[in-house]
Image: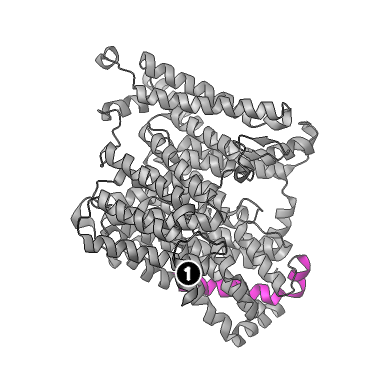
C-alpha cells in the first residue's frame, strides 16, 4: 500500500524545500482569520491567493493552499461557537451545541473542544489518506447517484432531530428549506420560482441565505442586550479552560474516530464534502448517545462530532482531487486551477508519476495539524474576547462583515439582498418556533437531493428493481441508514414491552 | 386542562403559517405551470404536499386548541412556556424592527451611495440605535470600520464593489 521509495523521495522533497515550510504558517493563519469572518469561505481566500501561487513551486503552492484550507476549516467554528453564526455550511453543526455552551459561559471550553477535535480529525483523516489514497479514490468512482442520494438522506434525517418545541413545525421548516433549495434552473432545465429575476437562475445563494437565517435569529434578538454572555463573571478568556476543553475532547475518542472516518470517506464525494460531513457526524453521534435530547442544548460531544467531521473532510476531498482530478467542492476546484497553472493535470496518472509530491503533501499536513493547534490556541485566546465586546458594537460589525463576505461570494448585490430577505424569514421562524437549523439543513442538501434523485430515477430506468439489486454499496448504505434510524426506537419499544410484561407478572 | 378552555389562537403565528402555506402553493403552482412532468415534480411535489399538510394541521391546532393526545415533549414544553414567545431574550420589538429596517436600508442603498458611505452611515446609526451615546466613539468606530472594509473590498475582492469616495481616494494614493 505504501510506496517506500516515493515516501523517501517525498521526505527529501520536504527537506529541501524551505519555501513550502515557510508558507505553511501564514497559510494556516490566513485561513483561520478568513474563516472566522462569516461569509468568507475557504474558496474565496483560495481564489484571492491563486495568482500568488504562480510564483511558487508546485509543492509549495499545494502546501500553501492546503494550509489555508486547514486553517479555514477550523476558523469557521469560531463565530459558530461564539455568536451562533456559522461562516460556512461546514460549521453548521458546530453551532448547534457550541453556541448554547457560549450562552452558558462555557465558550472557553467549547473553543478548546473544537480546536482539539478539529486537529485530531484533520491529522487522523490524513493518516487514513496516507494508507488508503488508492482505495479511497477507487471507492469514490464506484459511488453513483443512488449512493449519493442515500448519503444526502442521511444528512436530512437531522431535520427530525433538530426540533425545537414542536416536531411538526421543525419538519415544516426543513421541508421549506428543501423547497427553497430547488428554486432556480432545475436539473431538467425548468425555471422554477425565480420571480423572473436572472440572479435567481443559479438558485438561492446558499451561504448568504444561511448567514441571514442564523444571524437574524440570533443577532436581531440580541438588540437591547448588553453582552453575549449575560453574567459578567463568566465573560472571561481563560487559557486554562480552553486547555481543559482540549483535554476533554480526548475523552471521547469514539466520537472523534467516527467523525474522521465519516469525513475522510464522505468528504471525498464530489459536491458533497464538508457541508454534509459535519451534519452526518453530528447526527450519528446524537443518535448513538444515551441522552440524545441533551444535544442542541450545549452537549460537548456535539461540538466534537461536528468539528472532527468537518476538519477531516479536507483529507477526503484531497484524495479525489489528487487521485482522480475531480474537485469535491469550490475550494478544491480552485486548487485544481492552481494545478493547471503549473501545467499539471491531477488524476490517476498524477498519482502514479508524482507519488512523492502526494506523500509530501500528506506528511506536511500532519505537521499542519500541530501548527494549527499552536496557532489556534493563540487565535481563539484572542477571538474569545469577542464576548467581552458590547453587543451594540458587535451587531453592526458582524452584519457589515457578513454583507462584505456575501458580496464577495456572489459578485453582485444578490448575495447581500438574499441575506436581508432570509434574515427576516429567520427571525419570523425563530419567533414562532420553526427550527432555523432544520431549514438550513434542508437548504444545503435540497438541491443535491433532487439532482441525485432524478439521476437515480433515470439510470434505474424508472425504478427498475434490478438496478438497485446490482448496487451492493447502496444496499449496505441503506441498511446502515435504516439501522441508525430505527435501532434505538425499536430497542426502546422492546425494553418498554419487556418491563411492561414484567410489571404485569 | 384549564389552558384548553382559555385557548386563544396566536393570530400572528397563524398569519406566518398562512404565508408559508401561500409560498408552498405558489411555488408548486408555478413549477407545475412551467413543466407538468414527473421529472420536474419528483421531489418538490411530495415535499410540498407534506409541508402543506403539516401546516394545515399546525393551523388547526392553533385555531381549535391542542388535540387531547399531545406528545410528552409538547406537554413539557407547554408547561415551561408561559408567554407565546418565550425564547425572546431581550430587545423590544421596536428596536428589532428598527435594526432590521436599518440593515435592509444599508444593503439596498449600497449600489446608490456606495459601500463605503453606506457602511459608515449604517454602523453609526446602528450604534446610536443600540445605545451608544458617546459621539466620539460612535463616529470613530463607524469611520474605522468603513475605511478598513472599503480597503479590504478594494484590494481583495475580484468583483468591484460600488464605492462613493473610497476608490477615488485609493487610486490617487
* Residue A148 position in % (x across, y down): 66, 45
In screen coordinates, is B47 left or right of B10? Answer: right
> Residue lying furthest bottom in this view?
A16
Residue located 33% across and 64% down the image: B143
- Front-most of residues A413 and A144: A413
* Residue B119 position in % (x across, y down): 39, 57
The residue to which callout 1 is attached is: B168
* Residue A253 position in % (x across, y down): 46, 57
For residue A285, say whether it is visible: no
CA neighbours of label 1 inside 10 A, class few (<14), some (14 to 19), many (20+)? few
Location of residue A426 with respect to A46 vertically, above or below: above
Secondary structure state at the residue bearing disc 1: helix
- Front-most of residues A59 and B116: B116
- Front-most of residues A471 and A332: A332
* Residue A380 position in % (x across, y down): 36, 65
Per the image, is A359 magenta? yes
Instruction: Find residue A150 and report its image quarter.
Output: top right
Q: Which residues are magenta?
A: A348-372
Q: Chain of mark 1?
A: B
Residue located 39% across and 67% down the image: B147
- Front-most of residues A72 and A481: A72
Instruction: Find residue B101 and report its image quarter.
Output: top left
Q: Could you tell me which quadrant the C terminus of chain A lies in?
A: top left
Amino acid at each position: 500500500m505504501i510506496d517506500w521509495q516515493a515516501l523517501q523521495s517525498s521526505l527529501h522533497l520536504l527537506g529541501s524545500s524551505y519555501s513550502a515550510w515557510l508558507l505553511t504558517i501564514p497559510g494556516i493563519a490566513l485561513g483561520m482569520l478568513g474563516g472566522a469572518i462569516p461569509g468568507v469561505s475557504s474558496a474565496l481566500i483560495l481564489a484571492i491567493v491563486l495568482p500568488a501561487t504562480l510564483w511558487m513551486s508546485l509543492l509549495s503552492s499545494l502546501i500553501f493552499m492546503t494550509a489555508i484550507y486547514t486553517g479555514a476549516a477550523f476558523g469557521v467554528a469560531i463565530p459558530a461557537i461564539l455568536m451562533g453564526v456559522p461562516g460556512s455550511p461546514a460549521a453548521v453543526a458546530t453551532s448547534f451545541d457550541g453556541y448554547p455552551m457560549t450562552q452558558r459561559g462555557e465558550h472557553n471550553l467549547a473553543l478548546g473542544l473544537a480546536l482539539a477535535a478539529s486537529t485530531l480529525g484533520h491529522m487522523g483523516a490524513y493518516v487514513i489518506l496516507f494508507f488508503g489514497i488508492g482505495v479511497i479514490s477507487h471507492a469514490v468512482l464506484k459511488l453513483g447517484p443512488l449512493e449519493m442520494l442515500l448519503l444526502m438522506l442521511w444528512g436530512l434525517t437531522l431535520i427530525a432531530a433538530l426540533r425545537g418545541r414542536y416536531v411538526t413545525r421543525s419538519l415544516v421548516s426543513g421541508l421549506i428549506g428543501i423547497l427553497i433549495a430547488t428554486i432556480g434552473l432545475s436539473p431538467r432545465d425548468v425555471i422554477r420560482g425565480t420571480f423572473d429575476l436572472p440572479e435567481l437562475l443559479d438558485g438561492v445563494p446558499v451561504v448568504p441565505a444561511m448567514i441571514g437565517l442564523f444571524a437574524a435569529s440570533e443577532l436581531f434578538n440580541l438588540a437591547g442586550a448588553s453582552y453575549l454572555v449575560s453574567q459578567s463573571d463568566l465573560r472571561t478568556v481563560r487559557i486554562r479552560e480552553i486547555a481543559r476543553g482540549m483535554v476533554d475532547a480526548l475523552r471521547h475518542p469514539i466520537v472523534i474516530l467516527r467523525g474522521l472516518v465519516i469525513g475522510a470517506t464522505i468528504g471525498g464525494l464530489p459536491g458533497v464534502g464538508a457541508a454534509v460531513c459535519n451534519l452526518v457526524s453530528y447526527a450519528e453521534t446524537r443518535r448513538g448517545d444515551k441522552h440524545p435530547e441533551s444535544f442542541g442544548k450545549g452537549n460537548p460531544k456535539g461540538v466534537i462530532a461536528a468539528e472532527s467531521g468537518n476538519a477531516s473532510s479536507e483529507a477526503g476531498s484531497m484524495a479525489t482531487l489528487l487521485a482522480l482530478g475531480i474537485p469535491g467542492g469550490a475550494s478544491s476546484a480552485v486548487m485544481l486551477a492552481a494545478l493547471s497553472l503549473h501545467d499539471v493535470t491531477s488524476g490517476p496518472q498524477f498519482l502514479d508519476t508524482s507519488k512523492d509530491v502526494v506523500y509530501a503533501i500528506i506528511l506536511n499536513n500532519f505537521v499542519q495539524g500541530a501548527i494549527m493547534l499552536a496557532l489556534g490556541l493563540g487565535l481563539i485566546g484572542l477571538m474569545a474576547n469577542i464576548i467581552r465586546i458590547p453587543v451594540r458594537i458587535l451587531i453592526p460589525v458582524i452584519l457589515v462583515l457578513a454583507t462584505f463576505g456575501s458580496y464577495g461570494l456572489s459578485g453582485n448585490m444578490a448575495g447581500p439582498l438574499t441575506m436581508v430577505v432570509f434574515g427576516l424569514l429567520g427571525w419570523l421562524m425563530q419567533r414562532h418556533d420553526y427550527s432555523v437549523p432544520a431549514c438550513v439543513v434542508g437548504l444545503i442538501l435540497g438541491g443535491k437531493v433532487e439532482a441525485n434523485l432524478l439521476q437515480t430515477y433515470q439510470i434505474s430506468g424508472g425504478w427498475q428493481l434490478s438496478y438497485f439489486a446490482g448496487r451492493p454499496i447502496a444496499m449496505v448504505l441503506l441498511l446502515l441508514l435504516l439501522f441508525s434510524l430505527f435501532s434505538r426506537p425499536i430497542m426502546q419499544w422492546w425494553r418498554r414491552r419487556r418491563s411492561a410484561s414484567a410489571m404485569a407478572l | 386542562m384549564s389552558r384548553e378552555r382559555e385557548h386563544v389562537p396566536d393570530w400572528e403565528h397563524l398569519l406566518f403559517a398562512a404565508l408559508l402555506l401561500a409560498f408552498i402553493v405558489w411555488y408548486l403552482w408555478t413549477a407545475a405551470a412551467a413543466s407538468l412532468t414527473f421529472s420536474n415534480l419528483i421531489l418538490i411535489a411530495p415535499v410540498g404536499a407534506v409541508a402543506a399538510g403539516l401546516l394545515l394541521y399546525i393551523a388547526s391546532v392553533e385555531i381549535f386548541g391542542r388535540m387531547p393526545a399531545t406528545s410528552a415533549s409538547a406537554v413539557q414544553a407547554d408547561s415551561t412556556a408561559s408567554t407565546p414567545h418565550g425564547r425572546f431574550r431581550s430587545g423590544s420589538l421596536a428596536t428589532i424592527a428598527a435594526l432590521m429596517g436599518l440593515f435592509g436600508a444599508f444593503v439596498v442603498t449600497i449600489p446608490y451611495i456606495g459601500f463605503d458611505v453606506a457602511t459608515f452611515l449604517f454602523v453609526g446609526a446602528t450604534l446610536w440605535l443600540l445605545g451608544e451615546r458617546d459621539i466620539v466613539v460612535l463616529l470613530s468606530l463607524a469611520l474605522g470600520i468603513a475605511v478598513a472594509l472599503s480597503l479590504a473590498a478594494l484590494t481583495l475582492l475580484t468583483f468591484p464593489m460600488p464605492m462613493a469616495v473610497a476608490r477615488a481616494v485609493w487610486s490617487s494614493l
